[in-house]
Amino acid sequence: MKYIKFFILTLSILLLTGCWNYRELEDLLIVSALGIDSNEDGFDISVEVINDKMVGGGEQSSGSSSEETPIVVYSSKAKTIREAIDKIILESPKRLYLGHMNLLVISEDIAKKGINEFLDYFMRDTEIRKTFFTTVVKNAKASDVLKILQPIENITAVSIQSSLEIANVYYGEFSNQTLEEIVRCLFTTGRNPTIAATEVTGDVKKGSKNDNVSTTSPKTSIKVKGTTVFKGDKLVGYLNEKEAIYYAVVRDKIDTISLSFPCDKKDNYANIIIDGVKGKLKATVDKDEPKIAIDIAGNAAITEFNCKIDLKKPSNIKKIEEMANKEIVKQMKKTVKKVKELNSDIFGFEEQFYRNHYKYWKKKKDKWDELFKDIEVKVKSDIKIERISSSVETAKSR
Amino acid sequence: MEKIDINAKKVIDKIKKQTYNSPDIIVKELKLNDTEIAIVFCESMANSITINDFILEFLQETKMNEVKISNIYQFLESNMPTHKVIKVNNYKDLYYTLLSGFTLIIINGSSDVISIETKAALDSGIADAKNEKVMKGPKDSFTENYQTNIGLIRKRIKSESLRLEEHVIGSKSNTKVGIVYMDGIASKKLVDQISKKIKNIDIDAVFDSNYVIETISGNKKKTFPIYLSTERPDFVSINLLDGRIAIIVENTPYVIIVPAVFNDFFLSSEDFYQKNLNVNFTRIVRLIALLITILLPAIYISVSTYNHEAIPTNLLINFATQRQGVPLPTVVEILMMMVVFEILKETDTRAPSAIGSSLSIVGTLVLGQAAVAAGIVSPITIIVVATTSISGLISYSIDVVNGIRWWRIIFIVLSSFAGLYGVLVAGLIFVINISSIKSFGIPYLTPFAPFFLKEQNNGVFLSNKRKFNVRSRLTAKKDIERQAK
C-alpha cells in the first residue's frame, strides 16, 4: 500500500505539469535567425536554420556532401508571424525550434512602418528567448542578409551577432541590442529606442553561394554601420559610427573610446585611448526653460602622436588634454545637433525631466517635441591624460 | 549440556560416531602410568609440528623417565609446555575446541578433557591493502585471522582502555565476533545495544561481516549503507579514537565501523596523513564527482530532449551534430551504454587476471570506437557514460558505489519523463530518502542536516583542529579534547 501511494504521488508530480515537451535533438531544426520584410498584405518571414551536419565539430557523419551549405534559409508569407513560421514546416524536413534564435533582422521599410506591428509575437512566445540581438538592415532585404555566407564564422546569424557584440564593446554602437532592451525602451517615458544598423556590400545573389567563402576576400559581406534612430516605434534616421559613440557616451553604455584629434595647425593627428568613460546627464529648469548638461570624464593614454610637441613637459600634456577635450565637445555637439534634427529623443532628455522635474514635465509633456528641438545643451569634457605609453620621444621631434 | 563420559574409550567412540569417522580426525591412544590416555586432533586445523614437538615429546619423556604421578589430569595441566590449556567438561565445547584446531587429551577416569592450542595458520598473512589504496600512509590490511586483526589494532592503540567484547555466533559455523571500542570515549549505551543485538543473532553460519551488520542494522530497504566496512587497520584506529565502535568478524578481512553517516564515505584515512590544503582540494574534487555521477546523464537527457534552451547555442549545435543518424532515443542510448559498462565492470572483477587485459581491450574498442563508428551510439553518449562511470568510483565503499548506481537510474528515468523538472523531482526524492536514514541514532546527513557548526571541521573540509585536537562530537561522548593541556 505504501508503495502504491508513493508511486501515485510520484506519477502525479510528473504528469500533472505543463512541461510535456519531449523532442529529440535530431527531430529539430535549430533556427539561428529570423528576418522580417514588409509585404503588401502581411509579413514576409525568412528563417535561417542550421544545417548541423555541416557545422558541429568532431567526426562528421557519413553521407554529408561538402557541397551543402552550413545554413539554409526558408521563407514564407502570412498575416501573422506565427502563421508564417507554421507554413515553413510544410517545406522543411523537421520541426523548427526557435529557442536558440540569436538574431532578428528587420528590413528598413518595415522599420519605417513601425516595429510594434510584429513585436508582440516575440514578447509573448514561450520558446523564444528575449535576449536575442536585433538589427536593421539598411540597403537589402532581411531575407537576403540571412542568406549571405560568411567566412570564419559559418553561421551567418552568429557572425552578425558577434560583430554586433564586438562593435558594442569598441564603438558603443547601440545601447539597445536585445529585444528585452528595445521593449523596455518602448515602454519607458521620455526615451526613444535605437537599434544597430547593418549594411550589405556586394552582390547578394553571389553571397549566398559557397564561392563567397572559398576566397580570401569575400565579394559580399555584411558590415555594422552605425545605429538607427527610432521615434516611437518608427525608424526616422541613422547615426554614423562616430555619432553612435557619442550617443553611447551620453547613455553611459561605453567604457573605452579611441579618439583621434588634430594636435597642431598642420593637419597632424594624435590618438588617445580613453578608459573608464563616464557620461553624465543632468537636467535643470531655468526660468521655465529646460536645460541639459552633459559631463564626460575618463582617463586617457596616448597611443599615437604625430606632432612635434615635447611630451616630457607636463605643461604640454595639459595642452594636449585641452585639445582632446575640445574635440570631444565638438563631436558631442555635432551629435546632439544631428539628433535634434531627427527630432527623436534617443538620449532620454525627457526621461531626466520626468524623473527629476516631474511637475515641469507634466506641464510641458504635450509640447515636448518643440522643446526638444530648442533645448539648450551644455557639454563639458574632463578627460585626463595619465599615461604616454612606451615612448617619451615622438618620432617627429627628431 | 552433555557431560563428558569418564571412560575414555566411550568418549572416543562418541567423537568418531559424531564425525562419521572423518579421516582428518586423528586419534592416538597411549598409556601413561598404566592409565589409558588418548590424543585427538583435527589434522586439517591443527599444526602437526607443534603436536609432535611438544605434546607427544613431553608425553614420551614422562613415560621414559617413569615419573610417578598421582593425578594425571593435574600433572598434565600444570606441566604441559604450552601457553594455552583449556579445561573442557562438556561435548559442545569439546567439538568446538577440536574443530578450532585444539588438541584434546582424553584421560581415562577423568570427566575433564585437556585442550591444548595447536592451531595452524590458515590465513593469507598480512598483505598490502588491495581495495583501499593510499599514496601515503600505512599499507597493511586486515587478514582472515581474527587474532591478527585484533593485534593490528592493538599495535596502533596500546592503551588499556581499548576494550574487546567477544561473542560466538552461528550455530554451525561458531564464528567469533568481537566488538572493539575505546572505553571513556565511545558511548557505552551504544556498545551495550550492539552487543545485545549481536548476542541475539540466530543464524547457522556467518561467513562475512556483512552477515552481522545486515542483521543488526535493520536497514534493509535503504540503498546506502549505515556502516563503514574497511580493510585498513589505521582507518579503524582513527575511528575508534573518534568514539566509534568496530565489529571484527572471524574469517573476514573487512572490519565494520558504526555509526557512519553519508559524509564518511567520501573521506579516506589518507586525508589525515596529508597537508590540509591539498586534502581539501581532493575533497572538493570528490564532491564534484559525486554530483557528476548522480546528475550528469540525467542532465544530458534533459537538455537534449526537453530543455534545449538551457544550454549555449554552440553546444546545442554540437549535440545535434553528434546525434545525426543515431537510431535510438537518447535515454535508451544512455541506459544501453550504462548496462554495457556494468557488464564490463562485473566481468573485469570476476575474470581471472590472465583474461583481464584482453577484456579491457575488447571493452575499449567496443565501447569507444566501434559503437560510434557503426552509428549505434553518439560519441557524446560515450563521454557522458564514461565520465559518469569514472566519477561513480570515487567512494572506496562498494556499497555506496552501488547505492549511487540505483539513484543514477532513478534520475535518468525521471529526467526522460519530464526533463529538468524530472531531475528536480528525483532530487527531492533523493534528499527525502537519504535524510530519513538513521545510522544507530545519528541522522545520515549530519553534520549538514541537522547542521552542527562545531562539526563542520570535518564536513566538506577537514580542518587542522579536527585532525589533531578534537574528536567528533557526534560519536565521542566524553573526552573531546585530544591534546593534554
Image: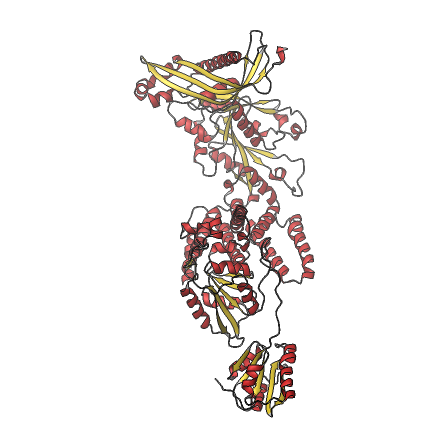
A268 or B281: nearer the viewer: B281
The image position of residue A312, as x and y in percent, is 56, 14
Q: Is residue A89 left or right of residue B51?
A: left
A308 or B3: nearer the viewer: B3
Task: Say if residue B140 shows up in the picture.
Answer: yes
Q: How is the image coloured?
A: secondary structure
Task: Say if residue A229 shows up in the picture.
Answer: no
A33 or B206: nearer the viewer: B206
Q: How many dots with numbers?
A: 0
Q: Residue furthest bottom?
A: B34
Residue positioned 62% across, 77% down in the render: B46
The image position of residue A150, as x and y in percent, is 61, 29
Q: Is residue B454 above or below residue A63?
A: below
The image position of residue A21, as x and y in percent, is 48, 45
The image position of residue B284, as x and y in percent, is 52, 47
Q: Is residue B13 left or right of residue B225?
A: right
